[in-house]
């Protein structure tokens, strides 16, 4: 801890920078109050009256999917994997562009004028699938979001030089969450979109300026030299045998590229808020640049942080101590510590405001998304009577607060034992593996049935094997196999392998279930579509 | 290795360059879109208010 304290004391963060941050946060609160005046019904609250045009939709898509946690875990991936990590960004950008060009999934969903993905399940499959799918979506989404607060607080502590004790970290988490809850509860999607726009402007400026200053501080050539010296060819070649990636991982990342833009509920919510299918397509074509940038720039910051840390003895000792010493500082801190040292006064305040902007724009959208799903697709169908628009908005607000408290508890108490990215992808896989099968089959295969949908959704639970502790218990204590065989299974069960297997199981489940249990009414889209 | 180095270097240059242009466009056009969104929400409320009166 003392070693960490000494490292973060090197930050350039001053009172002026705190002033910039406070002004920005005040602006966000004011927007929440103003936006509240524009909320008349549930459609206004959830999809901003479906009146969002192209440029604003790109801003809100970027604001939502480029969160502080994204910057943190991507910087960690760049720090650990080097330039080879860029393949993830290339896939994400290219696939999002193709989705926009073809309208694959997103434009077709927009055509059905649903508020949420589970609502589509209800129209295409059955009420039971809608409720089951909604619960899995919320469960996976809320757990996935569980570590966001923690990562956000670590960034702020790392960049500002605040004391790294548990109390301060907890205080920062509570303060950030309270602010987001305030304006999201008040203004719903209108508030989210308005703040997303401002956050986009601040964030874009912060990303470009910081990258320029990074290259001013340490040249491209110097970064390349250090990275090659320390990591060898695997720092560039994602297929390199000694690197952390490989062909299976790349395939998994290509699939994740599709998931993040076209299956993940918060991205889809942006498509559903657009004023037309044409806007949806343009949103994703332009937005593909944001999906590219949200990985490439943080990767680069992480790589630059690695190059600087390896050339400053005190930092190198802290992050990469010898084998005989204690564990090094968490690599999640590398990027914020690096930025805290290279960014000048004033700019560091702007960049921190930009990162807090990224944090808030992700949290507000996610909170709104999960709470809307629980209201619209669990409470309303189970209520058995029509709930008034006002009642639905109140219930959604109550869910926003409840989910906020839940993620706060997860951030306080969950002991994260794997990389942040692995934790997030596996918790999210609980939802998206089944959702992938349901959306694709529901939109493009007439024989898909409710029986197949239940099979596919349930297959998502296989993703739990992605958690190291869980599969350790299963392989060593539950399965009747030798320790040697368990060792082999442990080595085989990487997050990429588990993820791809879960997707395959969900698709197989959908096909088999649809043939074994066809819907009695056949393709029941029209019957359930009011 | 030179293939990968060149690829990643140009990917970064092109992506940051094109993102900067897009960010400028979104900043200008997005402000106009906000105005239109708020006007449409306000118009929707006025219309629903008139319908309620009728």
Image (cartoon, coloured by chain):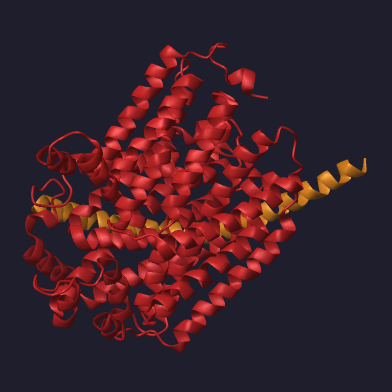
Chain colours: A red, B orange
Residue for point 59% across, 43% down: A374
Looking at the image, residue A81 lies above or below residue A131: below
Q: Which image quarter holds the N terminus of chain A?
A: bottom left
Residue for point 43% across, 79% down: A349
Extreme residue in the bottom direction: A15
Residue for point 29% across, 76% down: A337
Q: Position of residue A227 (x, y in %)?
A: 13, 65
In the image, taking residue A415 as reference, residue A303 lies left or right, namely left
Looking at the image, residue A490 lies above or below residue A12: above
Residue for point 56% across, 32% down: A130
Q: Position of residue A166 (x, y in %)?
A: 39, 75
Looking at the image, residue A264 lies above or below residue A205: above
Q: Which image quarter holds the C terminus of chain A?
A: top right
State the residue in front, A327 or B30: A327
Question: Does residue A197 appear in this view?
Answer: yes
In the image, taking residue A465 as reference, residue A391 lies left or right, namely right
Looking at the image, residue A275 lies above or below residue A67: above
Question: Does residue B29 appear in this view?
Answer: no
In the image, taking residue B3 as reference, residue A210 lies left or right, namely right
Q: Position of residue A367 (x, y in %)?
A: 54, 54
Q: Quadrant of residue A326?
A: bottom left
Q: Quadrant of residue A215?
A: bottom left
């Amino acid at each position: 801890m003392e070693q960490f304290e000494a490292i973060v004391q090197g930050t350039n963060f001053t009172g002026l920078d705190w002033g910039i941050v406070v002004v920005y946060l005040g602006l966000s609160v004011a927007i929440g109050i103003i936006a509240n005046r524009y909320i008349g019904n549930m459609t206004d609250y959830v999809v901003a009256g479906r009146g969002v045009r192209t440029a604003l939709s790109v801003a809100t898509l970027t604001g939502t999917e480029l969160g502080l946690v994204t910057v943190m875990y991507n910087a960690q991936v760049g720090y650990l994997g080097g330039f080879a990590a860029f393949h993830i960004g290339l896939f994400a950008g290219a696939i999002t562009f193709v989705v926009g060009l073809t309208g694959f999934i997103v434009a077709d969903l927009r055509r059905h004028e649903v508020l949420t993905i589970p609502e589509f399940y209800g129209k295409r499959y059955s009420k039971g699938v809608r409720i089951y799918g909604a619960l899995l979506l919320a469960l996976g989404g809320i757990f996935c979001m569980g570590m966001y607060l923690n990562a956000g607080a670590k960034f702020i502590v790392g960049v500002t030089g605040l004391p790294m004790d548990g109390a301060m970290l907890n205080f920062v988490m509570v303060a950030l969450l309270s602010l987001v809850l305030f304006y999201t509860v008040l203004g719903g999607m209108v508030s989210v979109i308005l703040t997303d726009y401002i956050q986009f402007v601040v964030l874009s400026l912060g990303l470009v300026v910081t990258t320029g200053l990074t290259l001013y501080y340490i040249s491209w050539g110097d970064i390349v030299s250090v990275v090659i010296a320390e990591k060898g060819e695997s720092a560039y070649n994602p297929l390199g045998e000694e690197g952390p990636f490989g062909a299976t991982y790349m395939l998994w990342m290509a699939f994740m590229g599709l998931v993040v833009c076209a299956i993940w509920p918060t991205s889809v919510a942006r498509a559903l808020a657009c004023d037309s299918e044409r806007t949806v397509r343009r949103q994703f074509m332009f937005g593909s640049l944001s999906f590219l940038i949200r990985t490439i720039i943080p990767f680069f910051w992480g790589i630059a942080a690695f190059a600087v840390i390896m050339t400053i003895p005190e930092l190198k000792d802290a992050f990469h101590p010898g084998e005989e010493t204690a564990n090094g500082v968490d690599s999640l801190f590398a990027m914020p510590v690096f930025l805290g040292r290279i960014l000048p006064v004033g700019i560091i305040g702007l960049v921190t405001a930009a990162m807090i902007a990224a944090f808030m724009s992700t949290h507000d959208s996610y909170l709104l998304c999960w709470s809307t799903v629980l209201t619209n697709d669990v409470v309303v169908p189970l209520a058995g009577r029509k709930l008034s628009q006002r009642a639905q908005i109140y219930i959604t607000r109550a869910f926003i607060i409840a989910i906020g408290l839940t993620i706060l508890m997860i951030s306080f108490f969950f002991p994260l034992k794997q990389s942040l990215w692995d934790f997030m992808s596996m918790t999210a896989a609980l939802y998206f593996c089944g959702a992938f099968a349901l959306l694709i089959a529901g939109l493009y295969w007439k024989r898909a049935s409710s029986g197949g949908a239940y099979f596919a959704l349930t297959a998502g639970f296989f993703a739990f094997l992605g958690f190291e502790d869980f599969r350790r218990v299963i392989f060593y204590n539950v399965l009747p196999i030798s320790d040697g065989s368990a060792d082999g299974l442990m080595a085989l069960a990487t997050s990429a392998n588990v993820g791809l297997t879960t997707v395959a199981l969900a698709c197989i489940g959908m096909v088999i279930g649809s043939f074994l249990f066809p819907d009695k009414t056949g393709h029941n889209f029209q019957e359930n579509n009011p | 290795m030179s293939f990968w180095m060149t690829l990643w270097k140009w990917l970064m240059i092109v992506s940051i360059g094109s993102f900067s242009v897009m960010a400028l466009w979104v900043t200008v056009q997005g402000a106009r879109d906000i105005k239109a969104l708020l006007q449409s929400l306000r118009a929707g409320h006025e219309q629903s208010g008139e319908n309620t009166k009728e």
